Image: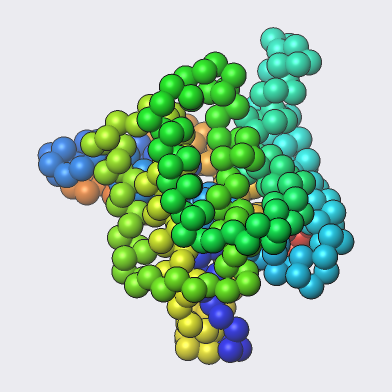
Amino acid sequence: MNNRLASPDILKVAAIISVVLIHGSFIFPYTITQFELSVPQLSIGIEAFRFCVPVFILLFAYFQEKSFIKKGHSSVLPRLLKLFIPFFFWSMVYFLITADIKRSGISGLITKHWVGYGWSGQYYFIIIFQLLVVFPIIRWLMNKFKINLYVVLALSLLFYSCISYSNWMNIPIVEKISHRAFIYWIPYLVIGIIYAKNITVKIPVLIGILSIILIPLEVHFLHPQNNSLYLLPSTFLASFLLTTSILKTEVTYKNMTTFTGKSIQYIASTTLGIFCLNPLVILGLEYLVKISGFHLDFIGCSFIATILSTLLILSICITVIFMLKKLKLGILTQ
């Protein structure tokens, strides 16, 4: 294995596993035993994994800035076009599978299936498209006004607190748009740009990992009014701490076993494909589970079901991506 830093890929792997866990943790039905009733509900634990999309967006900004430094404005349009291909293809696939053409008008079909509501990963593309458009403007402003990281952190926490503990998200049009508007993700864009140049903050990895507990703690003790867990101040803080702690580490692929290093590299290279495919795989598995009558009924089955479904979905997605690459269709998943 080479001496390249593995930390960005480790973050990608952690984030994509979290995405799959959130989306597919309940595909296998199970009986709630006394054990399940005696421990915190599984949904509470799953809330902690909401760092996934913020981490992906921060990494997007991180790599986009590195590319911008090398290539300038010419790095933006190719990236936009490259992302549009999988967005359009998979949106069309999900549209053909789920759209109710007879009951929906043209406007309804567009708003439901093409602007972030068509499938569970579609909104991510909508956010990234917006951020790519404003990326040159944001970095120009940052260079002009010499943005300080600690000022960004303070303002970001205030920003997300105002969103979460006010009536802002109760305004109908704002609630409809939800977290799909690029403005909500500007803090991650700014931090990613700063980190691409130099990461000056050092946070122990253990603190970064444990910080994700802040998300369910805020949800269940402070009761924010915000209907999107991605926009909570705790989600921002946990995502920042986790990303910073891991990016700052000096773990290289040379320090890993060959199997571990190659596994992390491969999964990290397929994250976009997994993002696109996992809703389709989940639909298929849910149908098979339903017709088969598969059911888990033993102590701890809720946790086993979560692990089993997550690993199964990931395995199928990676297998399909491998096959698509062999068929020279890798452009649909990268």
Q: Position of residue 188 (x, y in %)?
A: 56, 53
Q: Quadrant of the C terminus?
A: bottom right
The residue at the point 20 percent across, 42 percent down is 40
Residue 121 versus residue 298: which sits nearer the camera?
121
**Depicted 53 relative to depicted 173: above or below:** below
Q: Which of the 4 image quarters holds residue 267? A: bottom right
> In the figure, is residue 321 to the left or right of 302?
right
> In the figure, is residue 243 to the left or right of 107?
left
The residue at the point 63 percent across, 35 percent down is 181
**Depicted 121 relative to depicted 331: above or below:** above
**Depicted 327 relative to depicted 36: above or below:** below
Q: Is residue 139 visible?
A: no
Q: Which of the 4 image quarters holds residue 210? A: bottom left
Task: Give the farthest residue toward the front.
Answer: 145
Count of residue discs: 0
Q: Is residue 146 visible?
A: yes
Q: Position of residue 132 (x, y in %)?
A: 74, 50
The residue at the point 53 percent across, 72 percent down is 199
The residue at the point 30 percent across, 52 percent down is 213
Residue 277 versus residue 61: which sits nearer the camera?
61
Q: Which of the 4 image quarters holds residue 179? A: top right
Q: Position of residue 319 (x, y in %)?
A: 61, 60
Q: Position of residue 280 (x, y in %)?
A: 61, 41
**Depicted 84 relative to depicted 287: above or below:** below
